Image (cartoon, helix red, strand yellow):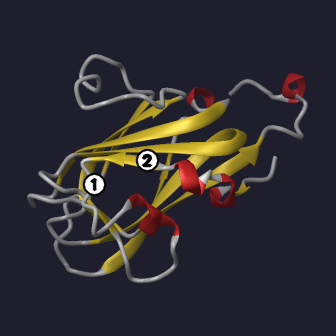
Amino acid sequence: MDITDITQNVKQNDVRGLNICTAYPVSNLFVETNVYTQSDDDEQLILHIPFTQPISLWSIWFDIFTDDTHPILLKLFINMPSITFSDVDDIVPKSIIKFESMNDRRRVQIEKKVERHRFRKVNSLTIYVEDNNGSEISRLFSIGFKGKILSNMDLQKLKKC
């Protein structure tokens, strides 16, 4: 099974964020420039990312700057597009992603694999940035996804992991 970049299958016009600074909107996550998405009131933010069709997610890559604004603790939820800050502590995430603390002030792309068996039929992904490397704000330059589009796939042929 070929793993491909499925970022183009994000419904970009429907991506939403909570606690996002209006000057640095979520649409910046899918623009190939030096702009970024930034939290507003504190370091926490929530991203709701819908896909054009169901996907099997294998990994997520994050384009970050290694200073105090980069995320260090993220929680992932699938097919729950209405999660808010009042919900995140009451719902068990499908996965938790942790980053090392980095302060060498460079822009890097980090790929984080997910447990494939937990991310088989994803219509939408919610990413909760719970904590960062010490700043009052969190920043992400871009985000991307690798996996498989399921619409043209015979689901009966999927093998268990």
- Contact check, label 2 and label 1, Cβ < 8 Å: no
Image-based side of 103 in relation to 119, left or right:
left
User: Where does the image place residue 16, in percent across and percent down from the top left?
Assistant: 43, 47
| Image-quadrant location for residue 71 | bottom left
User: Could you tell me which residue is drawn at 24 percent across and 52 percent down?
Assistant: 72
Is residue 116 among the parts visible in the rendering? Answer: no
Which is more toward the observer, 42 or 145?
Answer: 42
Image-based side of 37 in relation to 126, left or right:
left
Q: How crowded is mark 2: few (under 14 residues within 10 Å), some or many (20 or more)?
A: some
Label 2, on which residue?
Answer: 16
Label 1, on which residue?
Answer: 20
Amino acid type, label 1: Ile
Considering only vertical position in the picture, is 102 above or below 116? below
Q: Is mark 1 on a helix, strand or loop?
A: loop
Considering only vertical position in the picture, is 16 above or below 143? above
Q: Residues within 10 Å of mark 1 (few under 14, many from 20)?
A: many
User: Could you tell me which residue is drawn at 89 percent across and 40 percent down?
Assistant: 152
Residue pushed farthest top?
90
User: Where does the image place residue 22, in percent across and percent down from the top left?
Assistant: 28, 62
Image-based side of 111 in relation to 18, left or right:
right
Mark 2 vs mark 1, CA separation in Å:
9 Å
User: Could you tell me which residue is drawn at 52 percent across and 67 percent down?
Assistant: 30
User: Could you tell me which residue is drawn at 24 percent across and 60 percent down?
Assistant: 21
Which is more toward the observer, 71 or 37?
Answer: 37
Considering only vertical position in the picture, is 149 above or below 156? below
Quadrant containing the C terminus is: top right
Amino acid type, label 2: Arg
Considering only vertical position in the picture, is 78 above or below 36? above
Q: Is mark 2 on a helix, strand or loop?
A: strand
